[in-house]
Amino acid sequence: MELQREPLIWMKIAQVCIAFLTLILMISYEACGYVNYTCLNSTATSAGPYKNQVCISYPFRLSQQRIVNYCDGPKDAPQQHIMHVNYDGPSKFFVTITVMSMMLAAATVGFYLKFWDKYHFTTTFAFPDLIATFTFAAYWLAATFSWGAALGGLKDYTSPEQVVDEIKLISVCHPPIGKCEISSRGWNRYGALDMTILLGVVSIILWYVNAGMVFNKIQAIKAEYEQGFDASAHLQYPSISQTNNGRQREPRSYGSQQPMF
């Protein structure tokens, strides 16, 4: 069998490509809106307007989104929190599994290309491959469902209406301190994040199918080994007695004969 036609190799290459695309979509996601406010009180050095960019991006630690309040005076310039929830745990877990699975699949491809003769004829390397593949299939299942649940909460909390309501609670948006104008057009773009969930499901299928392929490979190696062992045993120790002139023929011996004295 030519190595290029081996399904296990192409399965690993597909896993690397899917994981790489998932990683790019996760770490490059960014959705931004703008909060412009004007100070109304007389204590501010400048009335403004002040422009603040509020972005939602990986690792989705929303509590870091703040607006600097210049309406209370430039010396203090306190930072006011806009949001109070974080989704960094599930997102980091999902990205970690993505990176680790990509590295494992790439390393396995390299191992296949260099040591395929040993892998193809012995289960010494196939068993660890099966364990690692099944383990990462379970990791992908847990990470995808965890990130999917977090993404649902992220969509609810970062919807334009919810973000606007959160921003309106800070002091710079309340007279007599200040007045806000909010642009929330960039906060409802979730297509890239939805694609990461779809790719996570694809990865689950690929890794579980891969585990099944490795298991079948192990069974095939065992069957070939047992078949070859039985054939070798039959050649060395024939089980059918052959007769010659009515006498039972002794089985041949291929070992070293005893010296005759």
Image (cartoon, grey):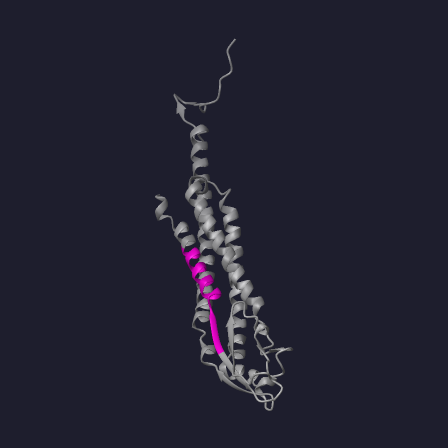
Task: Judge whether residue 22 is colored magenta.
Answer: yes
- Majority secondary structure in the magenta region: helix
Q: Which residue of the protein is positioned furthest toward the top in this rendering?
A: 261
Q: Which residue of the protein is positioned furthest toward the front in this rendering?
A: 45
Point out residue 34 in the picture as x, y percentages from the top left corner. Answer: 49, 79
Range covered by the magenta-colored residues: 14-33
> Between 133 and 157, which is closer to the camera in this rendering?
157
Whether residue 250 is situated above or below residue 70 in the rendered picture: above
Q: Which residue of the protein is positioned furthest toward the right in this rendering?
A: 76
Whether residue 44 is situated above or below residue 215 in the rendered picture: below
Q: What residue appears at the point 43 percent right and 45 percent down from the top-left corner?
A: 112
Point out residue 10 in the picture as x, y percentages from the top left corner. Answer: 39, 52
Which quadrant, please, contains the N terminus? top left
Whether residue 11 is situated above or below residue 166 in the rendered picture: above
Residue 119 visible, this angle? yes
Q: What residue appears at the point 45 percent right and 59 percent down from the top-left corner?
A: 19
